[in-house]
């Protein structure tokens, strides 16, 4: 699956961008007809490719279709989802994972009837080890049973191993690639790293694509 997303910087402002995200969501649904893809990791090769924007937009599209959808912050080194979604949670999933807080207290409404968010506390130690821990895996399984969809934002694959760790636990992984920003071999390495970890890479979403048609003959 390869999808092209427009230059819209904020979800809902650009019709072409919204349509492209809806198509991305539909494609994920088609791929999971027999075995639903409920937990979806969104990552990128390097920073600044727009993966967090795509994760939020995808979760909003899922929620708008009537599915109870959770945004899960797993980019522990550069948290941004709460700010982007306009959410100010008091409790993160770290407290839930260790048993210090109930899940229902940590999950926050994130706009709309069906969209929720579970943030992470700042400065959690040893992110890769924490994401690979039995406690996080148990929490992740609980989230998958509680919500129709869980959309997970992770760090870029080329920066840290965190994305591969979480992707190995998820049903599907979408790699966001900014047009003209990353070389093809870098994208290929990122896909290979994810697949080697056991991730189900279902496709690439091209971001910041030009909406104007190419000149004739090109």
Image (cartoon, helix red, strand yellow):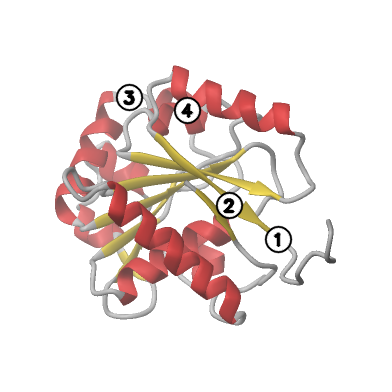
Distance between mark 3 and mark 4 Cα atoms: 14 Å
**Pointer 2 residue:** 51
Q: Residue at x 71, y 26 (%)?
A: 185
Is residue 188 placed above or below 26 in the rendered structure? above
SS assignment at label 4: helix
Distance between mark 1 and mark 3 Cα atoms: 37 Å
Distance between mark 2 and mark 4 Cα atoms: 15 Å
Direction from residue 29 to residue 200 in the image, left or right: right
SS assignment at label 2: helix
SS assignment at label 3: loop
- Which numbered disc covers residue 209? 1
Look at discs 3 and 4 and give the one toward the viewer: 4
Q: Are marks 3 and 4 in contact (CB under 8 Å)?
A: no
Q: Are marks 1 and 2 in contact (CB under 8 Å)?
A: no
Look at discs 3 and 2 and give the one toward the viewer: 2
**Is residue 140 something that shows in the picture?**
yes
User: Of the residues under marks 1 and 2, which one precedes in the sequence?
Assistant: 2
* Frontmost residue, 109 versus 159: 159
* Frontmost residue, 95 versus 155: 155
Distance between mark 1 and mark 4 Cα atoms: 26 Å
User: Of the residues under marks 2 and 4, which one precedes in the sequence?
Assistant: 2
Residue 163 on image: x %, y %: 50, 33
Look at discs 1 and 4 and give the one toward the viewer: 1
User: Of the residues under marks 1 and 4, which one precedes in the sequence?
Assistant: 4
User: Of the residues under marks 3 and 2, which one precedes in the sequence?
Assistant: 2
Direction from residue 65 to residue 158 in the image, left or right: right
**Is residue 126 something that shows in the picture?**
no
Q: Counting other residues with Cα less than 10 Å from the Cα at mark 2, is it few (<14), some (14-19), or many (20 or more)?
A: many
**Pointer 3 residue:** 133
**Pointer 4 residue:** 164
């Amino acid at each position: 699956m390869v999808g092209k997303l427009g230059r819209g910087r904020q979800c809902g402002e650009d019709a072409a961008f919204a349509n492209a995200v809806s198509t991305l969501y539909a494609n994920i649904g088609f791929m999971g007809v027999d075995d639903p893809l409920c937990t979806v990791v969104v990552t990128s090769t390097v920073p600044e490719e727009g993966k967090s924007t795509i994760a939020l937009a995808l979760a909003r599209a899922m929620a708008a279709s009537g599915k109870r959808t959770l945004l899960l912050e797993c980019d522990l080194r550069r948290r941004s989802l709460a700010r982007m979604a306009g959410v100010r949670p008091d409790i993160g999933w770290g407290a839930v994972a260790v048993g210090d807080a109930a899940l229902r207290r940590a999950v926050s409404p994130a706009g709309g009837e069906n969209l929720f968010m579970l943030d992470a506390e700042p400065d959690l130690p040893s992110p890769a080890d924490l994401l690979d821990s039995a406690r996080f895996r148990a929490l992740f399984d609980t989230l998958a049973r509680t919500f129709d969809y869980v959309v997970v934002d992770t760090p870029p694959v080329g920066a840290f191993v965190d994305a591969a760790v979480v992707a190995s636990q998820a049903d599907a992984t979408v790699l966001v690639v900014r047009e003209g920003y990353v070389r093809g071999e870098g994208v290929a390495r990122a896909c290979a790293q994810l697949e080697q970890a056991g991730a189900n890479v279902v496709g690439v979403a091209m971001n910041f694509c030009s909406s104007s048609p190419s000149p004739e003959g090109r």
